[in-house]
């Protein structure tokens, strides 16, 4: 079959685009340029979505891939956590049907008119749906005199069969900021990471490929990236899940965030007129 793209009115009346290729399906909301679905035919969804997610213009969608930009976490003097991009309505500027049957959708973030600190940054995001999911996030500094610094993160929520039967590979030997129970810098010593309590870690200087091995679904998810030095691993576990209104109390069993970005110790500094591109490729295979 040749690929099909369809415009729909999604949850909460928000506009979205459905993509169906010969091998996969995907769904992307203009609100946040938020990928809410990527699923290979005959497999469980790769991306996880909360059944409690809000779909309203003032809130981020819970699950899928929130685009975090131009800052990560809380920032002094800013009201929004994780930047404004995930609650902005992006413009879809191109749909390209590629040789091989993939579809690439290009989105543009409207200029920041209400935040002078980032008004000169221009962001574009290309989502390519096929056998794998490709994500290219490009930022240009339109100032002709000033260097600008920002953070970016593709905050990806993955579906897992059972969080207790999952291991994360590729981060051995990396330094990370552990944000659970204070802020502590640590070194990852294990060959792989298992999750049996709340985990919220920012791994620095990690351009590496990370894999999630899922014993229950017998599936391996591979996260390959370019120009991304940070990897965030997050599972809220019991108390945090209960504290979030848009997250089910028991949903932490079935999800894991492995986020690719440039945050905290690894921000992007762009000279006048320069641009940067971070790319992530997400693929899955059976194991
Ligand atoms: C992660 C952070 O990236 O995002 C966590 O490391 C945070 O600290 C999580 O709780 C979710 O953030 P939010 O704003 O979507 O609830």
Image (cartoon, helix red, strand yellow):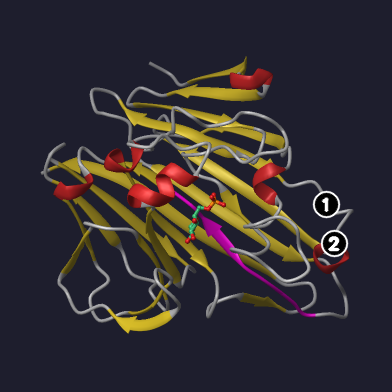
**Residue at x 84% of width, y 64% of height:** 120
Query: Do the residues bearing badges 1 and 2 touch, measured as CB atoms within 8 Å?
Result: yes
**For this rendering, which residue is in front, 211 or 11?**
11
Q: Quadrant of the C terminus?
A: top left
**Residue at x 41% of width, y 24% of height:** 21
> In the displayed structure, does residue 235 sit left or right of residue 278?
left
Q: Is residue 155 magenta?
A: yes
Q: Quadrant of residue 224?
A: bottom left
> In the displayed structure, does residue 74 sit left or right of residue 235?
right
Query: Compared with residue 60, is residue 234 higher up or lower down, i.e. above or below?
Result: below
Q: Quadrant of the N terminus?
A: top left
Query: Compared with residue 21, is residue 270 higher up or lower down, i.e. above or below?
Result: below
Instruction: Tell me, for residue 287, which label it has, or none.
Output: none
**Residue at x 61% of width, y 28% of height:** 55
Point out the stretch of residues depicted in magenta: 147-156
Main SS of the magenta part reads strand
Instruction: Tell me, for residue 111, which label it has, or none.
Output: 1
**For this rendering, which residue is in front, 269 or 255?**
255
**Horizontal and vertical percent position of residue 76:** 73, 71
Q: Is residue 144 magenta?
A: no
Dot 1 alpha-carbon crowd within 10 angstroms: few under 14, some 14 to 19, many 20 or more: some
Query: Compared with residue 60, is residue 186 higher up or lower down, i.e. above or below?
Result: below
Question: Could you give the CA–CA distance between mark 1 and mark 2, rounded to whole angstroms?
Answer: 6 Å
Q: Say which residue label 2 marks.
A: 119
């Amino acid at each position: 079959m040749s690929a099909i793209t369809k415009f729909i009115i999604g949850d909460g009346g928000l506009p979205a685009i459905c993509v169906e290729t010969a091998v996969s399906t995907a769904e992307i909301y203009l609100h946040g340029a938020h990928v809410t679905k990527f699923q290979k035919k005959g497999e469980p969804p790769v991306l996880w979505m909360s059944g409690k997610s809000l779909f309203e213009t003032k809130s981020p969608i819970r699950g899928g891939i929130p685009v975090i930009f131009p800052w990560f976490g809380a920032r002094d003097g800013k009201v929004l956590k994780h930047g404004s991009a995930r609650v902005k309505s992006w413009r879809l500027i191109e749909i390209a049907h590629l040789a091989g049957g993939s579809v690439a959708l290009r989105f543009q973030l409207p200029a920041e008119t209400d935040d002078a600190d980032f008004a000169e940054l221009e962001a574009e995001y290309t989502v390519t749906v096929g056998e794998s999911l490709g994500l290219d996030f490009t930022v240009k500094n339109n100032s002709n005199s000033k260097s600008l610094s920002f953070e970016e993160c593709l905050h990806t929520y993955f579906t897992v069969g059972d969080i207790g039967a999952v291991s994360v590979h590729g981060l051995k030997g990396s330094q990370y900021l552990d944000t659970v129970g204070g802020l502590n810098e640590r070194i990852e010593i294990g060959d792989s990471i298992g999750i049996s309590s709340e985990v919220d870690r920012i791994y620095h200087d990690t351009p590496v490929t990370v894999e999630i091995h899922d014993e229950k679904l017998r599936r391996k998810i591979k996260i390959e990236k370019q120009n991304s030095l940070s990897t965030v691993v997050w599972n809220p576990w019991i108390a945090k899940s209960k504290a979030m209104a848009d997250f089910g109390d028991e949903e932490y069993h079935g999800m894991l965030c492995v986020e690719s970005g440039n945050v905290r110790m690894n921000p992007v500094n762009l000279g006048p007129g320069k641009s940067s591109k971070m790319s992530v490729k997400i693929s899955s295979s059976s194991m």
